[in-house]
Image (cartoon, rainbow, N blue to C red):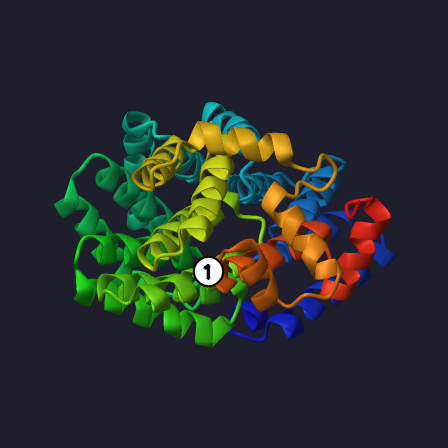
């Protein structure tokens, strides 16, 4: 774990897996359970939440065959965190409430559940739970939950229109993120702060956030930190009036998020990318991003993000309901391609370049680039040729 958190991720991951293999080989069930939990920590530090959840489920299964209560509690609290990040909020909240009701790791559960309430727009309960969690994490010096609960409170304050409090909480994150080498828990908070500062014209603070994220990305290099840095750079560019650079960096952040199972953050980034694309005059691409953000946020129950995305779509003269209705009707059931993506795919299949497709469809090349990236992801293909073959197999070209 020290290796992984210190920047040698692959070496750390291999060490934990080697230890786990030995424990399993010698039927050391309590040790194996603990090592599965350690494996999950390394995995989600590296933004691999899917495998982290699998490791924790296995660990809990082993814990329940033995009597290692300490490891079981650690596994449950980690699982609540991973489920929260993966957007499985109902299950996360249920497990969190069970911890609170059993008077076990209460302040950790309060912080994690409180953040979910903040994401859902339940501000009063979110503030109560997050305040309690932050008080304990601050008094015991628990870096991870301090960062997490402080970010949650910043989000609540911003949603309530309390700009001074939001700035104070974000500033507290900036002041303390370097206190630990385990930067993973600070990334999402500094990313949110960079966006909020830039949107509120606080250039210097946004620059400090970008600098911090740059150091985190350089130290660890995981996609979550790199994506957060790209967003921060994009937000600063938007603040400076450079919409092209903003759109480029925020679109890059969206692409990085495609490989990570953290949908709430992805929805936030897609929303901001949509705003930047609109500012750059890329109306169609902007609407695609904003509707993707709305759809993802709605599915999660993240009402604040969904509401903001809907307002941005309306500002472009469209209706979210009408646009998503037509998109849903035109989507391919098995693959989820939109009508426009399907149209672009058929041009790709006959060998046309993105420039040629843009001319044919009377849209910008940037928009075509976005559609091609989207359809490659949905078809799980790495190249245009592979996507063409896959489309033929699925009968999408007729």
Residue occupying the point 48% across, 49% down: 266
Q: Which quadrant holds the N terminus?
A: bottom right
Question: Label 1, on which residue?
Answer: 251
Observer-nearest of 346 and 175: 346
Disc tally is 1
Observer-nearest of 353 and 375: 353
Neighbor class of circle 1 (other Cα within 10 Å; few <14, some 14-19, many 20+) is many
x, y (%) of residue 8?
58, 75
Residue 11 picture quarter? bottom right
x, y (%) of residue 106?
43, 34
- In the visual, does 273 lie left or right of 340? left
Q: Which quadrant holds the C terminus?
A: top right
Give the residue furthest to the top: 101
x, y (%) of residue 151?
32, 48
Residue occupying the point 72% across, 64% down: 384
Residue occupying the point 42% across, 70% down: 216
Q: Is residue 157 above or below residue 15?
A: above
**Residue 17 in view, yes or no:** yes
Q: Say what secondary structure mark 1 lies in.
A: helix
- In the visual, does 60 lie left or right of 135? right
x, y (%) of residue 226?
47, 67
Observer-nearest of 387 and 62: 387
- In the visual, does 90 lie left or right of 391? left
**Residue 52 in view, yes or no:** no
Q: Is residue 33 above or below residue 15?
A: above
Q: Is residue 225 above or below residue 63?
A: below
Observer-nearest of 184 and 364: 364
Residue occupying the point 30% across, 35% down: 132
């Amino acid at each position: 774990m020290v290796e992984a958190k210190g920047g040698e991720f692959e070496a750390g991951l291999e060490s934990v897996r080697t230890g786990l293999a030995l424990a399993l080989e010698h039927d050391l069930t309590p040790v194996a359970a603990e090592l599965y939990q350690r494996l999950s920590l390394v995995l989600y530090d590296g933004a691999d939440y899917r495998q982290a959840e699998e490791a924790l489920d296995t660990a809990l299964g082993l814990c329940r065959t033995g009597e290692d209560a300490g490891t079981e509690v650690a596994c449950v609290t980690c699982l609540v965190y991973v489920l929260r990040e993966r957007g499985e909020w109902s299950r996360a909240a249920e497990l969190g409430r069970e911890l609170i009701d059993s008077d076990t790791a209460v302040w950790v559960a309060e912080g994690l559940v409180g953040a979910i309430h903040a994401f859902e727009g339940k501000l009063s309960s979110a503030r109560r739970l997050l305040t309690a969690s932050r008080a304990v994490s601050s008094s015991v010096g628990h870096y991870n939950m301090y960062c997490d609960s402080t970010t949650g409170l910043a989000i609540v304050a911003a949603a309530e229109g309390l700009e001074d409090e939001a700035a104070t909480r974000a500033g507290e994150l900036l002041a303390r993120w370097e206190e630990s080498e385990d930067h993973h828990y600070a990334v999402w908070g500094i990313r949110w702060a960079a966006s909020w500062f830039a949107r509120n014209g606080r250039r210097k603070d946004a620059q400090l956030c970008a600098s911090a994220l740059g150091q985190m990305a350089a130290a660890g290099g995981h996609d979550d930190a790199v994506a957060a840095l790209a967003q921060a750079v994009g937000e600063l560019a938007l603040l400076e009036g450079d919409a092209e650079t903003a759109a480029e960096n925020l679109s890059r952040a969206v692409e990085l998020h495609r490989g990570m199972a953290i949908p709430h953050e992805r929805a936030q980034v897609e929303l901001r990318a949509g705003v930047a694309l609109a500012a750059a005059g890329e109306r169609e691409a902007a609407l695609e991003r904003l509707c993707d953000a709305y759809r993802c946020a709605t599915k999660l129950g993240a009402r604040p993000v969904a509401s903001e995305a809907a307002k941005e779509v309306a500002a472009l003269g469209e209706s979210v309901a009408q646009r998503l209705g037509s998109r849903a009707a035109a989507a391919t059931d098995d693959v989820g391609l939109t009508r426009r993506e399907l149209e672009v795919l058929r041009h790709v299949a006959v060998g046309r370049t993105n420039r040629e497709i843009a001319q044919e469809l009377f849209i910008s090349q940037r928009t075509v680039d976005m559609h091609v990236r989207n359809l490659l992801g949905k078809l799980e293909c790495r190249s245009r040729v592979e996507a063409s073959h896959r489309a033929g197999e699925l009968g999408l070209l007729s």
